[in-house]
Image (cartoon, rainbow, N blue to C red):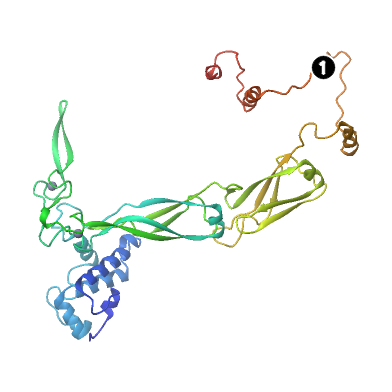
Amino acid sequence: MVKETKLYEALEVDPGCSDSELKKAYRKLALKFHPDKTGGQTSERFQDISHAYDVLSDPQKRTIYDQYGEAGLSGEGGPGGGMGGLSPEDLFSHFFGGGGGGRGGRPSGPRRGKDVAHGLKVTLEDLYKGKTTKLALQKNIICEKCEGKGGKEGAVKTCTTCNGQGYRVMLRQMGPMMQQIQQPCGDCRGEGEIINAKDKCKQCAGRKVTQVRKVLEVHIDRGMKDGRKIVFNGEGDQAPGTIPGDVVIVLEQREHERFKRTGDDLYYNAKIDLVTALAGGKIQIPHLDDRVLVVDILPGEVIKPAELKAVMGQGMPTERHHDFGNMYIQFEIEFPAANWTDLSHIEQLRAILPPATPLPELAKTAHIEEVSLTEMDPRQKARAEKGHMGDDDEEGHGPGVQCAQQ
Ligand SMILES: [Zn+2]
Ligand SMILES: [Zn+2]
């Protein structure tokens, strides 16, 4: 029975845990609570973790702690008693930077690994209703067999060619000048260390890391937008002496067949017949959940081509869930085909519809020329439409890009 468990609790381990379990627990928690990950402040938690590991990783101190609790430690005195001279940060860099046999001129303290971004395609329905989805990634973790050393204890040697730097400085003649260039060291392939082939860790082949499949659970909240980033702290590749970067999931909304989204609003294109536009009727809009909105167009409302109407509160949920955007419906009026009715009915239409605006009276001297409308063939039509879109360079006249394109 141990006297106290406080230090074990700080590392979230059992009092009976092994040395390697202790190391693993410290690695995990120290990375999580390292000041680099918590905004630069050395938190109390980080100090507690460091203190606990400092004591429990030393067999002598651990025995004393197990028998007498922390009181026993403070009475121990002498060099290395309790926290000794090692600050939490020093312990951290000692732990993460150590083991590799000294990496020469590296600045103290661990580097931070790269963040990795992954796109995640989502539907507008997912963003409307919210969804939890699983995403499998390959990532490097510190090899469990060699604990990131790459080989047996003592098998890892500092490269003598580059003094553990991983690169060599070469001089190169550039015209009249000598230029200094850095080249990765060929003997250690830029690693700064050499491990004999026979001593390499079997599990990772000396690479210190192994690749595993990691499944992340991504929570897509209602109302999230295209381009939204969801950050998984510290889930990036692990490497010895490095604080893992983050995995950043970037939502990519697929085009939707019915709706376009702008902010929290939805845009819907509704095709209605001329008779509905004039005499009223209903349209149905399947929403992003399982509802179908039935929209009433009132008789006599007279919907005009391209007219925009709103259905309030039927847009996307806002991300904070308190509100909804609007749905805007843009109407497209389907006119009847040419000659849809017997000409004898035309007079009835004239009688019903508001009268046409009379033409202005022409001066007696005006020169009048009667012309008629012509149906164009598709090529003529395409060309005419192109001109209408703002290409006002006249066809066949003068120089210009237009001619070259023909
Ligand atoms: Zn290994
Ligand atoms: Zn080298």
Q: Quadrant of residue 13?
A: bottom left
Badge 1 element: loop
Residue at left offset 24%, top offset 57%: 209
Q: State the residue position of label 1.
A: 370
Task: Kindly tell me whether residue 230 is visible in this rendering.
Answer: yes
Q: Amino acid at mark 1?
A: Glu
- The x and y percentages for residue 356 are 86, 32
- The x and y percentages for residue 400 are 54, 17
Quadrant where the image shows the N terminus: bottom left
The residue closer to the viewer here, 113 or 219, is 219
Q: Residues within 10 Å of mark 1 (few under 14, many from 20)?
A: few
- 217 horizontally vs 125: left or right: left
The residue closer to the viewer here, 360 or 296, is 296
- 299 horizontally vs 5: left or right: right
The residue closer to the viewer here, 368 or 128, is 128
Residue at left offset 83%, top offset 13%: 367
- 94 horizontally vs 216: left or right: left
Residue at left offset 17%, top offset 72%: 84
Q: Quadrant of residue 319?
A: bottom right
- 77 horizontally vs 121: left or right: left
- The x and y percentages for residue 386 are 62, 26
Q: Quadrant of residue 364?
A: top right
The residue closer to the viewer here, 113 or 376, is 376
- The x and y percentages for residue 382 are 63, 25
Residue at left offset 78%, top offset 20%: 372
